[in-house]
Image (cartoon, grey):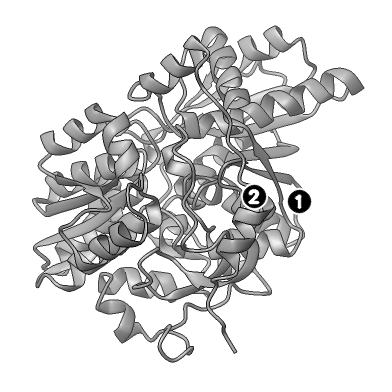
Amino acid sequence: MSTEKIPYKIFLSEEELPRRWYNVRADMKKKPAPLLDPATGKPCTPEQLSAVFCDELVKQELNETDPYIDIPEPIIDFYRMFRPSPLIRAYCLEKKLDTPAKIYYKFEGNNTSGSHKLNSAIAQAYYAKAQGLKGVTTETGAGQWGTALSMACSYFELDCRVYMVKVSYEQKPFRREVMRTYGAKVTPSPSDTTDVGRRILAEFPGTNGSLGCAISEAVEAAVSTPGYRYVLGSVLSQVLLHQSVIGLEAKAALDKYGVKPDIIIGCAGGGSNLGGLISPFMGEKLRGEADYRFIAVEPASCPSLTRGKYAYDFCDTGKVCPLQKMYTLGSGFMPSPNHAGGLRYHGMSSILSELYDQGLMEARSVEQTSVFEAAEQFARVEGILPAPESSHAIRAAIDEALKCKETGEEKTILFGLTGTGYFDMYAYEAYNNGTMTDYIPTDEEIAASLAKLPHIG
């Protein structure tokens, strides 16, 4: 390791911005299972997927052989406005915890969307524009993805239609208004504007919605509107590919000072930020070049990895999307309206699901009040108000650092700080007022949902 003192913030130069995305599937001996057509049970063809997604994104979704894919210059030009993002040494948190551990976090909140989501939003908007489309539809949970996509569509002069999970639409009105400021049309989901939305409302009257519901509506809107395609902010392999810029930059910054992390931690909902952060490090592990411990942290209220089943399931509640093999709680699972809206998804990325199933990464679930305790502790010493989603990773990082304090081990911890929590003040208010509660689904509730999984021969 370099004898030079490691600064609080490690910045890469503009010239060091990654020029290629890293495709971790190329280094996986056992690949993720293919998407299936629910009508036939056979792998989806490019032609089938192109009816829903942009043509170039379909190619990326199905590409399991190329380890690196060039980033088009217009996307790099946009990245330059907020990338490379800083890697920060959490000296103040280390001191507060009195731990021998060294803690680093990759901060993705330094853009108007307040999160990492812009990394993929600009790529997907670019490919939609290049294809000559009029607009795109999407879903959003907490609102970070919808905000990012509205920004990207505004940049490329595309129409943007966002179906926002109803509970987040009501909890986070200012997120909604940022999207509208950038020109997006925002609809609370489930809604009565789509056939699938009306079916969901009939089956689950009074529901607060879920990402699975919003996906169904966005897909229906895309396929029924000429000149539109659907874009997704997480879960899909193409999204994890775009988010690999996070891990590529983090690794380059650490390499500058000869630092090798022992533990890499990320919050896990659909898998975009965690997959992006760990990809280049996981590639080294898969190739036998280095070893790391990876930890996925999910909410106890929506524990797809820790309590779900590895099986084929619909990606959406309305069952209009292809089937994906993943850790799932069942596409009909309706998570409680906790404040980590971006993590309220019933399944997990097929890439991360396969890696987890192979024992290459760990997973743990944490309760909401414990998460906000960690968020508050972090904010008071590091000066950044973290998003509730990111705070799941903070919780695990603090716990690992305290274990080092007990054992005297000087481990190096890296976690992803996916964004800021300035639009989440109702959540912080509930925590500060002592009215925040923890909800954990029962085994019976999860079993009932899993019993409805599709039967694949």
Rounded to the nearest angstrom, the CA distance separating label 1 from label 2 is 8 Å
Quarter residue 321 falls in = bottom left
Q: Position of residue 88 (x, y in %)?
A: 54, 23
Q: Which mark is residue 281?
A: 2
Q: Pointers 1 and 2 in contact (CB under 8 A)?
A: yes
Quadrant of the frame with the C terminus: bottom right
Residue at image location 16% in from the left, 65% down from the top: 130
Q: Few, some or many C-alpha atoms within 10 Å of disc 1 (few <14, some 14-19, many ≥20)?
A: few
Q: How many marks?
A: 2
Residue at image location 22% in from the left, 53% down from the top: 191
Q: Can you identify the residue that label 1 sits on?
A: 290
Q: Which mark is residue 116?
A: none
Tag 1 secondary structure: loop
Nearest the eye: 11 or 343: 343
Q: Is residue 82 left or right of residue 291?
A: left
Residue that lies at the very extreme toward the right in this rendered image: 407
Nearest the eye: 319 or 406: 319
Decide if residue 5 is in sight here.
Answer: yes
